[in-house]
Each structure stands twice: as C-alpha cells, then as structure tokens.
C-alpha cells in the first residue's frame, strides 16, 4: 500500500497506472476546453490561454508523467481535471453553437443585467460547496491516500472556480 507521503519510481507498475490515469484526465480537460473554446477565447486560466495549444498540450503531457511520481499529487490532479472537464462540458454545446465571441457577449450581457454581487455570490457558492465536500473528505480520510487526495483535488478545483470566476466578474465590471 502506498502511503500519503510516498513517492514512486518512474517506470514502476504503480507509476504507469498513475501516469495513464493522469494523462487521460488531463486529456479530458484539454478536449473539453477545445470543444468549448477552440481558439481559447473563453479560457478562464490566463496561463493556459498564454501557453495556447502549441505549448499547452506537451506541457500537460510532461506534467502528467512527472506528477505520477507522487501519488498524492497525481490523484489530486486527476480529480481536479475531471471536475474541470465536467464543468466545461456542461456549457460547451452552448459555447460551440453560439460561437466563442457571441457566447462571451451573451454572458457579459447576462452579467450586466444581474447584480454583480449575485453573480459573484453564485460563483463563490459553487466553489464553497465543492470545497466543503473536498474538505470533509480530507478531514475524514484518516490520512488514507486516495480519499485524502480526492478531497485535495476537490479543494483545488473549488479554489480555481473561485479565483477564475472572480477574475471574470472583475473583468466584466462597468
């Protein structure tokens, strides 16, 4: 059994399994992003937007291989990536059908006709609810690797939703 603070050797059987799962989860995040915003116009992460597809894909592949050496980090990244992909896919069909720029304008209009406090509060509420589940999972894990790592991944996701949603609300202020 792998301990929470243990590293594993690249090329070992557990590493191959974690590398494959991490690469798959990162691929699903990238695929869902491409479905939603092929030109990255709607990408909320400024680092990913700056890297673009040309550098983002190989960077994610390399990170999957490196992160697989630390199961805690790999399982957390798998969790976060799957949650991000699910969130992307929730609205990807709408983004694709409207077009990236039209969708951005439509969302900006919706935000402009709503209270900025309400919009921001709803985004932060989503982040908080996910974070509560992640924190509860971590707190009740008794330091077991898998539940602790999944909880940590949920907390990372909730932090990202809170941060990038706040940036979006801030950018759309009048």
Image (tube, grey):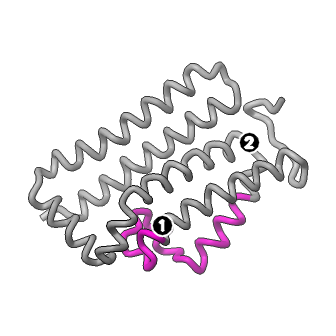
Q: Dot 1: few (<14), some (14–19), or many (≥20) neighbours within 10 Å?
A: many
SS for dot 2: helix
Q: Say above or below: 156 vs 37.
A: above
Residue drawn 64% across the image and 65% down it: 60
CB atoms at circles 2 and 1 under 8 Å apart?
A: no
Mark 2 lies on residue: 71
At a point 23% along the width and 48% down the height, the residue shown is 120
Q: Quadrant of the N terminus?
A: top right
User: How far is the residue under mark 2 from the one under mark 1?
Assistant: 25 Å
Q: Main secondary structure of the magenta part?
A: helix
- The mark tally for this picture is 2
Q: Taking 42 as reference, is 169 left or right? A: left
Q: Which residue is mark 1?
A: 33
Q: Position of residue 68 (x, y in %)?
A: 75, 51
Residue 94 in the image: x percent, y percent?
Answer: 32, 66
Above or below for 35 versus 13: below
Tag nearer the camera, 2 or 1? 1
Q: Which residues are magenta?
A: 35-64
What is the quadrant of residue 66 in the picture?
bottom right
Of residue 10 and residue 5, the one placed in the foreground of this image is 10
| Crowd rating for badge 2 (residues with CA inside 10 Å; few <14, some 14–19, many 20+) | many
In the rendered image, residue 140, in percent from the top left (x then y), is placed at: 57, 19
Q: Secondary structure at mark 1?
A: helix
Looking at the picture, how far across and down is residue 133, in whole percent? 46, 30
């Amino acid at each position: 059994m792998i301990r929470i603070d243990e590293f594993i050797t690249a090329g070992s059987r557990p590493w191959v399994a974690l590398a494959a799962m991490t690469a798959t989860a990162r691929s699903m995040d990238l695929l869902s992003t491409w479905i939603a915003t092929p030109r990255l116009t709607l990408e909320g992460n400024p680092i990913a937007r700056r890297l673009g597809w040309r550098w983002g894909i190989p960077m994610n592949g390399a990170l999957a291989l490196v992160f697989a050496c630390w199961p805690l980090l790999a399982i957390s990244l798998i969790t976060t990536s799957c949650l991000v992909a699910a969130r992307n896919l929730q609205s990807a069909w709408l983004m694709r059908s409207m077009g990236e720029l039209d969708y951005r304008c439509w969302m900006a209009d919706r935000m402009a006709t709503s209270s900025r406090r309400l919009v921001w509060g709803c985004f932060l509420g989503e982040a908080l609810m996910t974070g509560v589940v992640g924190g509860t999972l971590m707190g009740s894990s008794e330091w077991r690797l898998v539940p602790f790592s999944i909880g940590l991944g949920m907390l990372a996701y909730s932090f990202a939703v809170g941060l990038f949603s706040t940036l979006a609300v801030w950018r759309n202020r009048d």
